[in-house]
Image (cartoon, coloured by chain):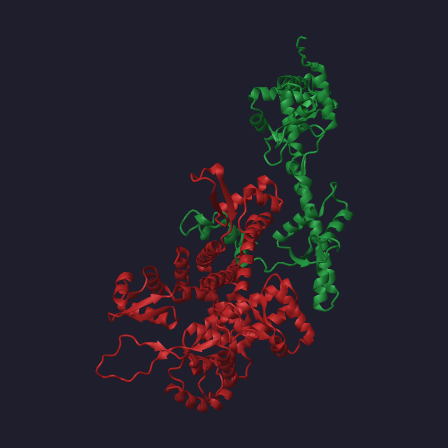
Amino acid sequence: MTQAELRLCSLLLREHFGEIVEKVGNSLLRTGPRPLRLLVGDTGLLLDQVKKALCVLIQHNLVRYEVQPRGSVEYEAQSKRILRLLRYPRYIYTAKTLYGDPGELLVEELLLHGHLPMSCAVARVADRLTETMEDGKTMDYTEVSSTFVRLADTHFIQRCPIVAESPRNTKAPPPPAPALAIAEKDMYTVPRLSLIGKGKRRHSCDEEEEGEHKAKRQKQEGGSSETPPDDGIYWQVNLERFHQHFRDQALVSAVASRMDQTSSEVVRTMLRMSEVTTASGASHTQPLSSNEIFRSLPAGYNIGKQVLDQYLALLADDPLEFVGKSGDSGGGTYTVNLHKALVSLATATLESIVEERFGSRCARIFRLLLRKKHLEQKQVEDFAMIPAKEAKDMLYRMLSENLVSLQEIPKTPDHAPSRTFYLYTVNVMAAARMLLHRCYKSVANLMERRQYEMRENKRLLEKSQRVEAILASMQATGAEAAQLHEVEEMITGPERQQLENLKRNVNKIDASENQVDETIFVLESFIESTMKRP
Amino acid sequence: MADVKVKPEVPDPMDIENRIIELCHQFPHGITDQVIQNDMPHMEAQQRAVAINRLLSMGQLDLLRSSTGLLYRIKDSQNASKMKGSDNQEKLVYQIIEDAGNKGIWSRDIRYKSNLPLTEINKILKNLESKKLIKAVKSVAASKKKVYMLYNLQPDRSVTGGAWYSDQDFESEFVEVLNQQCFKFLQSKAEAARDSKQNPMIQRNSSFASSHEVWKYICELGISKVELSMEDIETILNTLIYDGKVEMTIIAAKEGTVGSVDGQMRLYRAVSPLIQPTGLVRTPCGLCPVFDDCHEGGEISPSNCIYMTEWLEF
């Protein structure tokens, strides 16, 4: 837990959940697992407040609890999970591209609530969708629930662990905290529910239509206020699956830019086929035979079998080594080398950062060192064909930024500088970690700047909100155009301009936070994948 | 009858020398002491030594050491005339420089080999330079070092740096121009291959260019004043690889196909970058020079960051 991570976590908690939760989260992050009493003492808040804050955090999977052997329960904050708060917009957007509006709203509801039963989620989403639709139309539950089932089938959402059914031993006291567990096979099974109904609007102008169904709906409402049929079965978003999807996307786009569109489609097909069969941390996908790939190609691509074979052979031969040939049965079996792909993507990210910060000649030296591992100063100049003075300058700059390190090889036991070899080298893991830390700090900076901008213009924002409220109420009560116009005039031209600027700036900062998050994703996946390998 | 003492004929010293010179002419590679002794067995070692010393000091014989012993060789008459005016020390220094061939030799090394003091060496070197027998060449590796070599010799590539150096200066613009030309050639080849829309194998193979083809193209372009070899072109193509613009494969080629070296051929292909510029560098923080000094509440903080202000107004 570096300082930058801590700062970012507390900023995220404050933005999403408020100050009290931030205080509790901060204390847990800084001091590690603690029981409730110590936590209350640390934060100086009331017991009630701390309890509620912990509830919120546990609901969102940000804090875990564990029963210690002594009998106390300790709470531990998951810093990695808190950092995922940054990535919520990307998850929602992905769901939208894959499953349309119902998918997007379902994922959004699940992310906002942490855990949600299916019936609740479907009801909420249907209501929201109905509001955005035209008058007179409503959203049917069946469409939303079918999207829900599809999300569960592709493992994008999963069931939360439930309290294990244990025979009640009346003699033993109940455990201080329930132990949660879930079987692997149950994680994605959707309970058989018959959810019938339609979404309803909040402010409905068509009173007549509503009137007809009101009676029925009230009955349903009454029914649902009792235990819903899937009580106790809560669903949460499966973040690992989304990460897998992002990784696949990055891979496919890299192949598309390095080779051509068709090759990237082939790779996409291979990845899609191994979506549910490959564990999330695996370094290779399962071997897929070329016949299977041919059968699973999307319908639009009618390329012949031989052409497909050629593409696969080309992919396997490419210096990128994303695809490897693992055998000859079934027309040739191929696997996607995920670890190698992540390494290539991460090094490409590092190279692009060096290029943008220091210039293309520095990038040349950096790539040269990546390839040749260890080089002397003279050799660097020779290979990169850069004049000696400039090469020296660039190497020293990169050295001061710790992107490049020196390895000493002494010729004599006394390490005299004149009789020692100094070799330049790039330590990829260290550089990746350092840049990841820099990303965290950048995102924290951007968030602070955004909040600062909002604070500076608070007065203006409040004013515009008041004006809007007045306008809305006047419209509801039916006012003339002239009066509305008068109210609008309350915001002057320059103020309007300022508001425009503010909106534009805040959007820009928001967008760039998401962009930095993409870099964070690549670097984190690379570090994780390298650490997992034996 | 009294004993007639046969006085051993005292060979004329001149005769000895002439005889030795004749022998040397007979064996241009050099003669050993043994050969002279065999030829004139009645000569005493003393006289032989005197004769040889005289010939050496006159500069007509060269003394060489070989594995078997000492060799005497007739000295080139022309050379002999050149050194007529110089004394032994100069001749020694000249010998050492001659031995260094076209790599040249550093003054300190001359000192070690000849065991002469520095001042003497400097005087001799100046002397020889003025007589136009040797010249000083600045080495490209260490710019302060001067190596000496014979006047009419061409300095070796390692000293002058080869095609990329002109007058000890690295020609970076020349390298840049070559870089871009090679890349353009490979790029147009790859595009032509892509537009041909044939099956992927052929497409890929035709987008490759061997180093020989690139070399021919560059030669025909005629942008280089200096003759470039295939190795030079390969070093340029390597820099393109380090730029991430080009990738290389090595294939096995039949001996005798044009451009193959030791049964291998190098093929190059232009490629586009793997990813777009990454997210971090699109924000001001990614490129900020004072990133480490920035924290909330300090002189430099996100709230008053001028880079961010500029970026937001963009």
Q: Position of residue A85 (x, y in %)?
A: 44, 66
**Image-quadrant location for residue B126:** top right
Q: Residue furthest front?
A: B1
Q: Residue furthest left?
A: A171
Q: Position of residue A438 (x, y in %)?
A: 47, 54
**In this structure image, what is the colour of chain A?**
red
Can you tell which chain is drawn green? B
Q: Position of residue A247 (x, y in %)?
A: 53, 67
In front here: A36 or A510? Answer: A36
Q: Quadrant of the C terminus of chain A?
A: bottom left
Q: Is residue B304 above or below residue A474?
A: above
The reply to whether residue A367 is visible in this rendering is yes
In front here: A216 or A122? Answer: A122
In front here: A23 or A203? Answer: A23
Q: Residue furthest right?
A: B220
Q: Is residue A170 left or right of residue A428?
A: left
Q: How many marks?
A: 0
**Image-quadrant location for residue A319:** bottom right
* Residue under the point 27% across and 67% down: A36
Q: Position of residue A129 (x, y in %)?
A: 51, 79
In front here: A18 or A377? Answer: A377
* Residue under the point 24% across and 69% down: A70
The reply to whether residue B136 is visible in this rendering is no
Q: Is residue B283 above or below residue A306?
A: above
* Residue under the point 39% across and 86% down: A228
Q: Quadrant of the N terminus of chain A?
A: bottom left
